Amino acid sequence: MTGNFARTARVLWTVSLLSLSPVSLAAEPASDIVVEMNVMVPMRDGTRLSTDIYRPAKPGRYPVILFRDAYGNGSGSIASARKWTDHGYVYVSQDVRGRYDSEGSYYPYVYEINDGYDTQQWAGAQSWSSGKVGMIGESYRAAVQWLPAHLRAPSLTAIAPRVTPYNYYKDVVYSGGALLLASRLDWAFYMSGRTAQSGFDWDKMRLHLPLKTMDQAFGYNTQHWRDWIAHPSYDSYWKVFDVEARVNDIDVPSFNMGGWYDAFLRGTLASYTSMSKGAYSDRARRGQKLLVGPWNHFAGRPMNGAALDFGPDAQVDFNALERRWYDHWLKGEDNGVMQEAPVRIFVMGENRWRDEQEWPLARTRYTKYYLQSAGKANTASGDGQLVTKAPSGGGTNTYIYDPANPVPTKGGNLLPVSLGAGPAEQGEVSRRDDVLVFTTAPLTQDTEVTGNISVTLYAASSAPDTDFTAKLVDVHPDGKAYNLADGVIRARYRESLERPALIEPGKVYEYKIDLWATSNVFKKGHQIRVDLSSSNFPKYDRNPNTGHKFGEDAELRTATQTIHHSRQYPSHITLPVIPR
């Protein structure tokens, strides 16, 4: 139903699930559902949000599973609802403000704080509700769980955010000060209307400059895109959405689920670590769980087209995990879910799950691998080495960064996943002269790297502003190489994401590049590799090297980049090595 009719209609009906799908449901219990479609739930300002309610036909009060959706509450179909109603829950699916059948105007994230609280309280106060509300959903549907959490709605009992952003500057729009171009461009235009927009020439759009006119150049008037471009630093605009900054006010158990190749991996890990240490109450601190698998943003499912297969154990039934979680928190069942290890990770390379007691792992040995070469580390055929011994002499490597010919994105923590999110063979990238490659000798024993990864780079540029990128790579004995983690730092944000400062051309600066995290065993005979450059396009926007105000440049300049690796400037990667 759409339009005014949809917004005012209220349908109450009872469905026999067995009559809908007798073949697929034959082995499952019969269960009638009472369905109320398009219930218009008022928010504090009078705006009404379209809400579908699915509840067991048997009268009573039931715990509520709330699913708030920016992509159309048709996502909450009978098939989705019955996974909960058959087990004694009410399932509530709601269009967020300004999307599909809900009233109001849409703007990403900002209304989800108060609207989320109001909906949680409404759900807890209904005659069919036990007063306990839990939430489910991935990505934006996970964001709507975290954003109102600091308001501590009495009805909100637990949440289960999957592949979630947490700090919306660092996780969603910018990384290391560089714009997450492909992800935000695609999503901003997809979400530029009340319903999903499509039919864009993404390759052409990603090359458009200046960035601030992107929407108008392609016939749109997208305020949130222009606001993102107008706020390239972590300022007051972003602090409204920063869940990480409000963790001390959040008092809710959370089952945090993510993937090593997910675009929001940092947010998933940060939500667990920050809540475990700093949540409002001991109950909330102890009520945190973390699950990370070998997945991209489509967590739990095989990465179609990915260069590596992690085996059948890589697939996970999230419905079963979430139901067990809520049987405990919403129904009070003593099912052992909170007696299990709080952290469960998939170790790639060995392709097996492992339980842990904390994140990062307490037994981690942070080990520095230093860059070394005779000045010809360009391409995988160069002389770049990665060694554990600190340099005693001097050394530099140079390359030209041309933003008109950027290094192409090959795999990684990407959105959209159609760009090849996940592991990808790096041969094409490693043959470029603007990529420096540093590789260990073949390993004499298995080496596990599990945890947070960073690169410390000492570098100079001929430009007043530029980017430096880094990538951790697993080189197999056959010579094929696969990405594990990558990151970027924009030079003007080397000291602070809040206070940018241009660099002096030719001067050596220290840069810290956050590669987020991974869990991988580099098998005996494999090699550990680091690729360095100044672009990874279109994952990140191209730094034009001009030093001009962000988003206003149509001019592109080349830059000469010099990477130092010496006793004075010991550039290195720090790996979280786990004793075997």
Image (spheres, grey):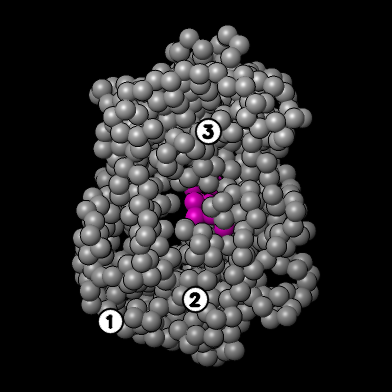
Region of the chain picked out in magenta, as a range: 261-271
Above/below status of 174 relative to 123: below
Q: Looking at the image, do the residues carrying marks 2 and 1 touch, with CB atoms under 8 Å apart?
A: no
- Which sits earlier in the primary sequence, circle 1 or circle 3? 3
Residue 445 is covered by the magenta coloring: no
Q: Is residue 89 visible?
A: no
Task: Tell me what residue is drawn at x 61 percent, y 11 percent.
Answer: 58
Q: Camera-side residue: 484 or 311?
A: 311
How many residues crowd around disc 1 within 10 Å: few (fewer than 14), some, or many (20 or more)?
few
The secondary element bearing badge 2 is classed as strand
Measured as percent of width and height from the top left, residue 330 is found at 59, 21
Residue hosting label 1: 557
* CA–CA distance in space, label 2 to label 1: 19 Å
Closer to the eye: label 2 or 1? 1
**Can you identify the residue that label 2 sits on?**
532
- Amino acid marked by disc 2: Leu
Please tell me which residue is depicted at 71% across the width and 59% down the height of the picture: 310
Real-space CA distance between mark 1 and mark 3, rounded to the nearest whole angstrom: 52 Å
Query: What residue is shown at x 59% (from left), y 49% (from top)?
Result: 299
**Residue identifier under label 3:** 77
Of labels 2 and 3, earlier in sequence is 3
- Cα distance between the residues tagged 2 and 3: 47 Å
